Image: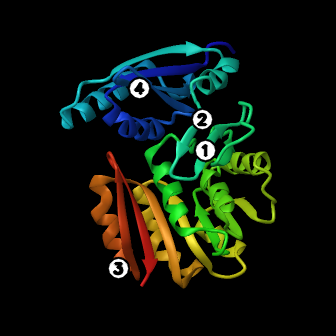
Amino acid sequence: MANNWWELQILCDPVLEDSIFWRLENFGCRGTASEMKGHSCLVRAYIPQEQAQLLDLAALSLWLRQDALVLELPIPTTHWHLIDEEDWASSWKAHWQPQEVGDRFLIYPAWLPVPEQSDRLILRLDPGLAFGTGTHATTQLCLEALEMRVDQESHDVVADLGCGSGILSIGAIMLGAEKVYAVDLDPLAVRATRSNRTLNRVNSDRLIVEQGSIDRMMKMIDAPVDGIVCNILAEVIIDLIPQMSAITKPSSWGILSGILLDQTKPVADVVEQNGWTIAALWRRQDWCCFNIRRS
């Protein structure tokens, strides 16, 4: 069937980029990319035609308008059109370019030739339909936090809850983690993580990925882990925090993101109620990242 994917193009103030990514993810978009156009940001996203009718797209446009009005920013312009099934993936890939993250990472699309020399860790990625390309603020915050936590001497074992494309799991391995256990409820995310594991030549016994959530993680690990990364929605994180102590050591650390600024208090309350201490709270535009420790 031809013409069965919507391509959305949203031209916005750069400050709105992260909130738009959040809206698009919740809307069900698969594959997102952004680029600067002068002083504005152009966000592209894709969603199957069967998942969104014209009225749905119009409603999304209104949400984006309201978000901008609340922040007293220029209203973004939103356009959409249909593209063929075989064109949707190549279309968004064409607009996703290599990106430096933190002090050490270079996120590199799998379909581009790898540079012969680089002073950064080259993390090759093909997210498929899974979340996590390195462009979103929450992913960047988590990678930067991992740089502070993991090194070649630490030999940390890490749990990745909601692994998406596997970008955080693979990043932890590259920094020096001894082993990473990764889970995601989405089978497409599990497939993407396994594919990117192979792409980055990570041994399957160092990055173990299965479908499921924290209950599955409890069955996968041989012993409590040294650290947790969790970059998903705040509501899900709040539900998971009471169970995190069951898979961690008394000295373990955690990195939590996917949390909007107005969601920090309920997350912080649950973190402290369950025996964790907030070591640092990092902010990037509308998003934040908790660096926590068992207390």
Residue 288, image x and y in percent? 37, 55
Question: Looking at numbered disc 3 in the image, what kind of residue is underneath it?
Answer: Gln
> Residue beneath label 3, please?
273
Q: Residue at x 38, y 35 (%)?
A: 17
Q: Quadrant of the N terminus?
A: top right
Left or right of residue 166, residue 73 in this image: left
Q: Residue at x 35, y 24 (%)?
A: 40
Mark 1 vs 3, N-terminal side:
1
Q: Residue at x 47, y 22 (%)?
A: 8
> Residue beneath label 4, please?
56
How far apart are labels 1 and 2 at the CA level? 7 Å
How far apart are labels 4 and 2 at the CA level? 32 Å
Question: Looking at numbered disc 1 in the image, what kind of residue is underneath it?
Answer: Leu
Is disc 4 placed on a helix, strand or loop?
helix
Report how many numbered discs are placed on residues in the image: 4
Q: Are marks 4 and 3 in contact (CB under 8 Å)?
A: no
| Residue 106 circle label | 1
**Which is nearer the eye, 249 or 151?**
151
Q: Is residue 162 above or below residue 37?
A: below
Mark 1 vs 4, N-terminal side:
4
Judge the density around disc 1: few (<14), some (14-19), many (≥20) Cα neighbours within 10 Å.
some
Looking at the image, is mark 2 or mark 3 nearer the viewer?
2
Residue 225, image x and y in percent? 62, 77
Looking at the image, is mark 4 or mark 2 nearer the viewer?
2
| Residue 233 circle label | none
